[in-house]
Image: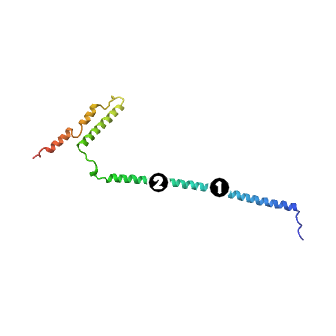
Amino acid sequence: MKPSPLPISTRFFSLLAEAEGLCDGAQEEILQQLEAAEAREETLKTKAEVNQWRLEANLWRTNFTELEEKVFNLSQMAASKSPSKRPRLDSSNTKEISRRFVQAVVTVKSEDESEDPDGPPSSTTVADEESADELTLDNSPMSERSRGRDKLPARK
């Protein structure tokens, strides 16, 4: 005996239900794959950002290393300068250096006194600058005494 064929409308609705089930299953699978793809995309974006940060960090590290090397090379160049190439101090240089030093000390001293509200305000005057000119190494009494000692005969 042959099973009786289902009426066309019943077959149609059963096929339609089966197709809808297949479509629903396919739709769920597609949604899962889409979610997985979005997650991979986020991961890839994150990985791309991390890679970008790594590249920037390497660039900064490279720049810092180059800067360190330049500083090291400059310090080596400065250290390799021989003393013979440095300018020698003659009496005119010594006088100028001494004058500038005394003038700087007088200026600092006057600034310190001007910061003190109880003390009288002072400033560098022409007299201070003249005294700075007088206190050079060659004109100081100490250097004259030391020069005089060199000329004294040795004691017996």
Q: Residue furthest left?
A: 156
Decide: few, some or many residues near mark 1? Use Cα within 10 Å; few <14, some 14-19, many ≥20.
Answer: few
Q: Mark 1 or mark 2: name the one nearer the start of the chain.
A: 1
Query: Label 2: which residue?
Result: 61
Which quarter of the figure has residue 114?
top left
Residue drawn 85% across the image and 62% down it: 11
Q: Quadrant of the N terminus?
A: bottom right
Q: Residue 26 location in percent, x, y? A: 74, 60
The three-letter code of the residue at mark 1 reads Glu
> In this image, 70 relative to 34: left or right?
left
Question: In this view of the protein, which residue sits in the foreground, 137 or 25?
Answer: 137
Name above or below for residue 21 compared with residue 110.
below
Q: Residue 49 location in percent, x, y? A: 56, 53
Tell me the distance, in whole angstroms, between the alpha carbons under discs 1 and 2.
34 Å
Q: Residue 33 location in percent, x, y? A: 68, 58
Name above or below for residue 90 compared with residue 23.
above
Name above or below for residue 17 compared with residue 109.
below
User: Mark 1 and 2 residues: CB-CB less than 8 Å, in contact?
Assistant: no
Residue drawn 20% across the image and 41% down it: 143
Query: Label 1: which residue?
Result: 38
Secondary structure beneath dot 2 equals helix
Q: Residue 144 location in percent, x, y? A: 18, 40
> In this image, 6 relative to 76: left or right?
right
Question: In this view of the protein, which residue sits in the foreground, 44 or 4?
Answer: 44
Residue drawn 34% across the image and 34% down it: 111
Which quarter of the figure has residue 128?
top left
Secondary structure beneath dot 1 equals helix
The three-letter code of the residue at mark 2 reads Arg
